[in-house]
Image (tube, rainbow, N blue to C red):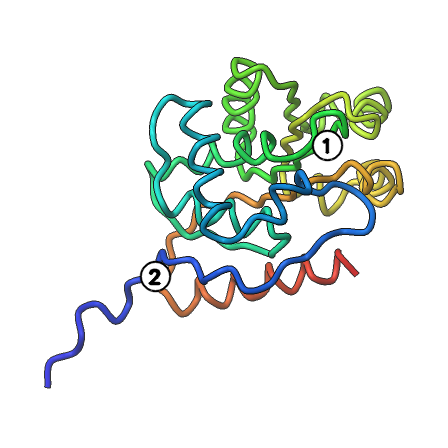
Amino acid sequence: MLPNPNRFLLSTNTPPLTQRSWSATGINPFKKVFNMKDQTLKEHIADVANQFYGQPAKSLRIDTMANLVMGCNTFLLAGTGIGKSRMAKIYYKLIPRKKRAVLLVLNPLDSLGNNQVFEKEQAGFTAINLYKLNFNKIAADDIAKGVYHFVYMSPEIFLNNKMWENVYLSLTFQNRLGLVALQTFVILPKEKLMFGLSKMLNFFNKMAQ
């Protein structure tokens, strides 16, 4: 029997919305959005995306954002062209602006963070790309105060910088934190990739406890 040629293909389907989690503190989406039925929520997200970008959003992008609105830990495995960088901007449109929420994005490349900061500023958001040379006490205080809608940084600073640790674990920042996104570029066999994703999930579960 010939082996199945599709046995190593990774599924890009997101699971149905089965669990909803409303945070007692911190950032949540608009209550009326959170309470929408699954299909209504997806239609609303599609409308918001269409109004913001002037073109329909891909279904995978809509499903992913719907899971985020419901408070689910969400992993998206997708190639170039799906519009991953647009998701954070659309997600920000689904939460109250007056909360001054902060969306944190971990980038493997400083140059990628610079590009995304430019994109966010062009769209009317405030953003900063943190690296060793510009991360100081002033930047740390501004982030905690919610001066920036989007904060980009390397995993190295996130894990190994004491000043950032103080910011991240502070009650002030935790009450502003709306989303943590980890962007990675991975070229691995399926088995090793699944092992790596499992380790990342365990790490963020420990951080949330």
Residue at image x 35%, y 63%? 189
Q: Residue at x 69, y 61 (%)?
A: 205
The mark that comes first in sequence, 1 or 2, is: 2
Seen from this angle, which residue lies furthest left?
1
- Give, as a three-letter code, the residue at label 2: Ser
Q: Residue at x 68, y 26 (%)?
A: 149
Instruction: Report the Cα–Cα distance between label 1 and label 2.
Output: 32 Å
Tell me the tag on residue 101. 1
The answer to whether 106 appears left or right of 62 in the picture is right
Measured as percent of width and height from the top left, residue 45 is found at: 48, 38
Callout in the foreground (1, 2): 1
Q: Nearer the viewer, residue 33 or 96?
A: 33
Disc 1 residue type (three-letter): Ala
For mark 1, does the 10 Å Cα neighbourhood hold few (<14), some (14 to 19), or many (20 or more) residues?
many
Q: Is residue 62 left or right of residue 200?
A: left
Q: Which residue is mark 2?
A: 11
- The relative height of residue 43 versus residue 119 in the rendered view (above or below) is below
Q: Secondary structure at mark 2?
A: loop
Task: Indicate which disc residue 115 carries.
Answer: none
133 left or right, relative to 9: right
* Quarter the C terminus occupies: bottom right
